[in-house]
Amino acid sequence: MRYQAFSERNNIDSLSLIECDVPRPGPGQVLVRMKAASLNYRDLLIVTGRYPGMESQGLIPMSDGSGEVVEVGSGVSRFAAGARVIGCFFETWLGGPMNPGHYAASLGGTAPGVLTEYRLFPEEALVDMPAHLSFEEASTLPCAALTAWNAMFEGPVTVRPGQTVLTLGTGGVSMFAIQFARAAGAEVIATSSSDTKLEKVRGFGANKLINYRNHPEWDVKVRELTGGVGVDHVVEVGGPGTLQRSIAAARHGGSVHLIGVLSGGDINPLPILFNTTNVRGVFVGSRDMFESMNRLITLHGIKPVIDRVFDFADARAALHHLEGATHFGKVVVRIG
């Protein structure tokens, strides 16, 4: 038997554990004993019924998880029992450009998630774990890390040594962006509402720090710190509420990588035109990107930043903790 989390109504406290049979892998399938799952803001929105087009009732939540292969079906050649693996956020986006069909298999949304003791994956939808990471650390990579990687290294304009990258806040995407930017030889300007968090960020390689509560016009401060020029790249996780300032903080011809929807509001598009800003939407990434990212993580020995690890039975508390927005880095649920 296995236990899996199951959402009954659109709120965190309706999440419950149910018992069911352990599935058996069919042709081309891999059975994974899940060891850890990490939370994203998307998971919170889905579980609470606030994610457009997603229905949480009856859904196994969470998109990001790692585990160990226990059995493979006929025809499987990529993995064998005992392999330590990570699931891909989009099960069918293996490489090349994204297309709308990939949305049909997004874990924890349009497909069952990973908050379960056992899960079947198509063999193509898994990647090997970097050997130096624990299951808890590896579980943070599928969405937050890969989104940061895609934004900075997979678009038409990529981060290069000597450039400047602006990150917003201290959530998972931003913390990975800081570490990746430093590995690429870029300078990092980081923002947060907390001086305590900013001091922690300094230890991960951020060169310059801005408390946006003290500097609500933080785009002006960014330009001041860059000699009036602006930054080459902004990893924009806030959405419409912060996008206008991100555009203003970018240099002429700079890039704003639009990732998050943490805030609402409208934007004036004219500064994009007059500043010739490159604004690119980023939605996680493909399996090929995932494997490229893992090579860099392995080469540089990068360790994901984990705020707190909860037990499987305390998954509701983990979601409440994420909802409180006091975390620094990733929130993780240990499953096995």
Image: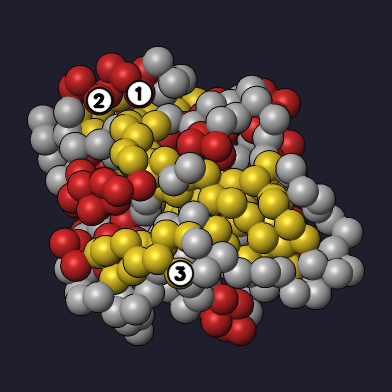
Q: Which numbered marker is on residue 197?
A: 2
Q: How far apart are marks 1 and 3 (CA)?
A: 43 Å
Task: Please name the residue shown 86% across and 69% down the image.
Answer: 74
Residue 264's spot in the image, x, y percent? Answer: 20, 66
Residue 245's spot in the image, x, y percent? Answer: 27, 51
Callout 1 touching callout 3 (CB < 8 Å): no
Callout 1 touching callout 2 (CB < 8 Å): yes
Q: Considering only order in the chain, which callout, 3 or 1, is on the residue closer to the N terminus?
A: 3
Q: In this view, does 14 lie to the left or right of 118?
A: left
Q: Nearer the viewer, residue 324 or 248?
A: 324
Q: Which numbered marker is on residue 20?
A: 3
The 10 Å Cα crowd at callout 1, few under 14, some 14 to 19, many 20 or more, is: many
Residue 98 seen from this side: yes
Q: Mark 1 points at which residue?
A: 201
The 10 Å Cα crowd at callout 2, few under 14, some 14 to 19, many 20 or more, is: some
Q: Which amino acid does label 1 sit on?
A: Val
Circle 2 or circle 3, nearest the eye: 3
